[in-house]
């Protein structure tokens, strides 16, 4: 009798629940930071211009992803050598204590530069912990699941991660609504982090009652456990080749689609389109709640019809619809802005040699050339623009439709004169924008929340379709003796590096180019590469024996 047949359905359901509950907790802790990035940027990265402050906050958000592969290597090796259970009991404890610590941190106003240093340190601990958690949970569940239903049972781990996103938005929204926006920005943002200590205790109690994976126990009993799982997984070409294909064809795809849908989209809508943060949180709460059962549905379908066709469908649809969806965000949130951008596009004509990247991480750049002053004014106003080459030595020109405003050269101005010159130029640009029909803010009479919610749901559904299938396909590529390690590393490079750094990279691209949609080229290029690798080189894995 097989190990899967010996496991009673009731016991299997209890095991899946316990593993999923822990994943909810860890994913909630890790994702919460991204939900509160705008507030964290103000609390911990004061002293630089707002655009740079927000990008730095996104980089701090991404710092947790930077070390996830290290956590994957360390805890993956531990899981393959000493057992799955031990590894993810350690990771869940690390994650809970680091998240609780973020809720206690003093801000920049209290201790200066030590505030972001401590914040990033705790974020790195979170990254190490999550690097060992997710792969362990997926592998542990898959190794208990009966043949033919592996996708279905693993999907509950995926659904747990989706529910964790909903939970983070729900707690943030409830806290925000109860305290009011000012109090939430001042101290209330700490509450969602502090709540994690309760979730930690509950998750530890649940997971302590779990038994070790039956496939791992069988492997150890037969003396087949890997003594050097990292060397086997990454030092032998037959396995390394599969790791590379899994990274390029599956995990990069999952990472960029997931973080575009769940994080970059909301940053785009709040930071560029200026939708209030509380409204965005409410929409994401509803959308992510609706998406949770879809993880199970898509995985169940993959058990019946195959993983690869559904993953390809998600990739191709996302690639085709990403730009129209983001243009649709602009039309839904601020239709007057969408009309004005088409009727009176903004162009900055300047000597490109005097133009700097509008990113100042340490607050020391002066931005005094006419090009920099022009671009800084438009970035501050949240206006999309294109660039044109001007003659060397000429002042930059901002053209709004048929009207042009000449910028100023601030290199010879005193600080007071530069401030006055900037203010005067910005006023002229604002007047030209207003004359061309650019709105001063969001008009609640034309704001379409149902349309915005529908577009967000479509984007998240596409993300769910990809996310539900890629981990199960990846783990089915590898043998039991190296499965934890071989799954975890490509997952955390693809999801952590290519996905986790996406918001910061995309916003930096927008700051560099001026076009608010330019940042989307990053995920679109990655999706194109992954689609080709998935189509040409990755096999169908549905019927493989573990």
Image (cartoon, grey):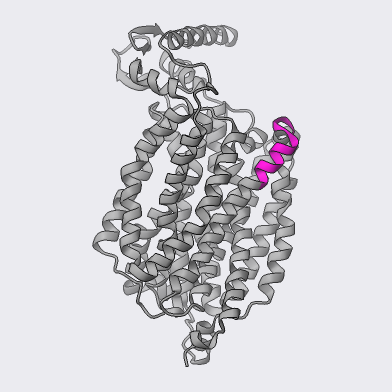
313 to 452, vertically: above or below:
below
371, above or below 198, in the image: above
Total marks placed:
0
Q: Quadrant of residue 297?
A: bottom left
Residue 122: x and y, percent?
A: 65, 51
386 sits to left or right of 59: left
Q: Residue 491 lies in magenta, yes or no? A: no
Question: In the rendered image, which quarter contains the C terminus?
Answer: bottom left
Residue 529 on image: x %, y % = 30, 52
Estimate the x, y position of residue 156 in percent, counting from the top left.
53, 65
Using the image as rendered, state which of residue 364 and residue 287 is in the foreground.
287
Q: Residue at x 47, y 45 (%)?
A: 457
- Residue for point 69% across, 34% down: 185
368 on left or right of 167: left
Quadrant of the image occupied by residue 345 = top left
Residue 317 is at least partly visible in this image: yes
Q: Residue 398 placed where, x, y %?
A: 38, 12
Q: Main secondary structure of the magenta part?
A: helix
Segment colored magenta: 171-183
In the image, residue 538 sits, relative to residue 52, either above or below, namely: below
Is residue 230 visible to the viewer in this orientation of the structure?
no
Furthest residue in direction left, as rendered: 536
Would residue 96 be found to the left or right of residue 314 on screen? right
Q: Quadrant of residue 251?
A: bottom left
């Amino acid at each position: 009798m097989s190990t899967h047949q010996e496991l009673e359905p009731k016991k299997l359901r209890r095991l899946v629940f316990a593993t999923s509950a822990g994943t909810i907790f860890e994913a909630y802790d890790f994702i919460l930071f991204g939900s509160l990035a705008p507030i964290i940027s103000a609390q911990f990265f004061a002293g630089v211009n707002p655009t740079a402050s927000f990008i730095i906050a996104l980089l701090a958000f991404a710092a947790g992803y930077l070390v996830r592969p290290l956590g994957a290597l360390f805890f993956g090796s531990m899981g393959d050598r000493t057992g799955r259970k031990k590894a993810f009991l350690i990771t869940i404890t690390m994650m809970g204590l680091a998240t609780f610590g973020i809720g206690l941190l003093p801000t920049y106003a209290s201790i200066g530069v030590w505030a972001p240093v401590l914040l990033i340190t705790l974020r790195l601990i979170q990254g190490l912990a999550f690097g060992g958690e997710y792969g362990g949970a997926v592998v542990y569940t898959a190794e208990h699941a009966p043949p033919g239903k592996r996708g279905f049972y693993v999907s509950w781990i995926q659904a747990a991660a989706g529910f964790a996103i909903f939970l983070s938005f729900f707690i943030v929204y409830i806290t925000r609504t109860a305290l009011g926006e000012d109090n939430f920005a001042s101290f209330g943002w700490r509450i969602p982090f502090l709540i994690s200590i309760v979730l930690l205790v509950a998750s530890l109690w649940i997971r302590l009652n779990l038994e070790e994976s039956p496939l791992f126990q069988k492997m150890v009993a037969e003396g087949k456990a890997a003594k050097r799982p990292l060397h086997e997984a990454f030092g032998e070409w037959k396995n390394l080749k599969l790791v590379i294909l899994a990274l390029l064809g599956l995990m990069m795809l999952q990472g960029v689609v997931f973080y575009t849908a769940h994080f970059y989209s909301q940053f785009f809508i709040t930071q560029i389109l200026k939708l209030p943060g509380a409204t965005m949180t409410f929409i994401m709460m509803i959308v992510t709640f609706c998406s949770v059962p879809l993880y199970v549905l898509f995985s169940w379908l993959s058990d019946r019809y195959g993983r690869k066709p559904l993953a390809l469908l998600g990739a191709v649809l996302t690639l085709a619809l990403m730009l129209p969806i983001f243009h649709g965000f602009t039309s839904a949130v601020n239709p007057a802005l969408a009309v004005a951008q088409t009727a009176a596009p903004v162009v900055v004509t300047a000597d490109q040699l005097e133009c700097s990247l509008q990113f100042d991480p340490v607050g020391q750049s002066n931005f005094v050339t006419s090009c920099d002053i022009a671009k800084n004014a438009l970035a501050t106003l949240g206006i999309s623009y294109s660039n044109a080459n001007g003659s060397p030595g000429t002042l930059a020109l901002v053209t709004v439709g048929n009207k042009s405003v000449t910028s100023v050269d601030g290199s010879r101005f005193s600080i007071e004169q530069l401030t006055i010159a900037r203010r005067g130029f910005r006023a002229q640009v604002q007047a030209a924008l207003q004359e061309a029909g650019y709105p001063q803010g969001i008009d609640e009479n034309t704001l379409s929340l149902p349309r915005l919610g529908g577009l967000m749901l479509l984007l998240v559904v596409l993300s769910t379709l990809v996310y539900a299938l890629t981990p199960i396909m990846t783990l089915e590529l590898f043998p039991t003796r190296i499965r934890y390690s071989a799954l975890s590393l490509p997952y955390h490079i693809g999801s952590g590096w290519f996905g986790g750094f996406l918001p910061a990279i995309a916003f930096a691209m927008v700051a560099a180019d001026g076009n608010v949609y330019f940042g989307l080229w990053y995920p679109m290029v990655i999706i194109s590469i992954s689609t080709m690798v998935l189509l040409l080189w990755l096999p169908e894995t549905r019927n493989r024996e573990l």
